[in-house]
Image (cartoon, rainbow, N blue to C red):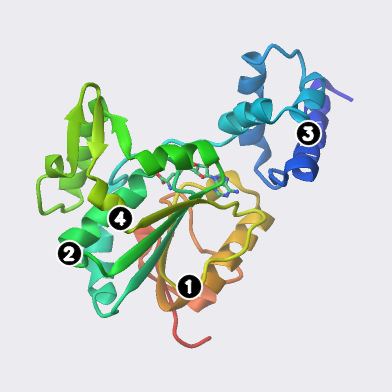
Amino acid sequence: MTADELIDLEIKLLMEGIFQVYGYDFREYSEASLRRRLTQWLSGSGYATLSLAQSDLLRDRTLLDSLLRGITVNVSEMFRDPSFFKAIREQVVPFLKTYPFIRIWHAGCATGEEAYSMAILLQEEGLKGRFRIYATDINVEVINKAQQGIYPLQEMQHFTRNYQQSGGTGSFSDYYTARYNHAILSPSLRENIVFAAHNLAVDTDFGEMNLILCRNVMIYFKQPLKERVLGLFDTSLMPGGFLCLGTKESLNHRTISDRYEAIAPRMQIYRKRYAKK
Ligand SMILES: C[S@@+](CC[C@H](N)C(=O)[O-])C[C@H]1O[C@@H](n2cnc3c(N)ncnc32)[C@H](O)[C@@H]1O
């Protein structure tokens, strides 16, 4: 067995152990990204190999949490891909306005920027009080951060630019208060957002959604896990509801694809058909 094959085996054994002990299922994550992230974690961990770390990881929840932080990529930003949010505003919101109440699921919301962006957008479109956002992530630490809605002040310039390019109709600075090096988002934005831990690999669906966003999450998954997650979304989405994926993802060649029509193909925004084809 080569050194590389040995590392692959160690990863496989560790992922199986983590699943058995904690229920976190990384067995269907793409190997290349997992390997890169685990190697990085290992280099700062004090362990020479994953096998040596394994015994402690399976017994010590705090150590496991540090590994989880290393495995999951939590980068996000407000109004990320501004043209995506512009398409939501121009092509999706007119449909949403016809519903008395709108339910939205941000799956893999990381530190919450995407959910707060949606709350701002819907508020500006006159939908205040008519929506609830469920923002979920596998990583409890990022969910706690998301709940606080506090971001480094230095990021606000970039977020403001994104907001303007996305067609924001107000002034972005009205949505936060600067305090020392931080920007504290207006607590009223949080009123309609429920943050919760949810693992797309093992947990069940959320019912009766009108809009689901899962952007830049499934890129780390292997095909069977992608299929599972898309199945979850399909079950959760009302007919006529919208499914949004990241710019590098698509519904092409997926089991559920013929039940959806692409309404903004470059933005990966799909609408669930009313009747099965
Ligand atoms: C790169 S972030 C994407 C954040 C946001 N959607 C965006 O596009 O800006 C990916 C997020 O997916 C989450 N994630 C990874 N595996 C997951 C799983 N099995 N269930 C739920 N969330 C998961 C990670 O914890 C991370 O916060």
Q: CA distance from mark 1 to mark 3?
A: 34 Å
Q: CA distance from mark 1 to mark 2?
A: 22 Å
**Is the CB–ligand 1 distance for label 4 below 8 Å?**
no
Look at the image and tell me in which quarter the N terminus lies.
Answer: top right
Crowd tier of the residue under label 1, counting other residues whose Cα lies within 10 Å: few below 14, some 14–19, many 20 or above: many
User: Quick check: 120 left or right of 40?
Assistant: left
Q: Which residue is mark 4?
A: 191
Q: CA distance from mark 4 to mark 2?
A: 17 Å
Crowd tier of the residue under label 4, counting other residues whose Cα lies within 10 Å: few below 14, some 14–19, many 20 or above: few
Which is more N-terminal, label 2 or label 1?
2
Q: CA distance from mark 2 to mark 3?
A: 48 Å
Q: Which residue is mark 3?
A: 14
Say if 269 sits above or below 50 in the image. Answer: below
> Which of the 4 image quadrants contains residue 58?
top right
**Is the CB–ligand 1 distance for label 2 below 8 Å?**
no
Viewer-side label of 4, 3: 4
Which is more N-terminal, label 3 or label 4?
3
Circle number at residue 16: none
> Which of the 4 image quadrants contains residue 157?
top left
At x 62% / y 31%, what residue is drawn? 65
Q: Which residue is mark 1?
A: 237
Say if 78 sits above or below 131 in the image. Answer: above
Q: In the image, residue 238 lies at what x, y percent?
A: 45, 77
Circle number at residue 125: 2
Marks 2 and 3 in Cβ contact (< 8 Å)? no
Q: Which SS class for mark 4?
A: loop
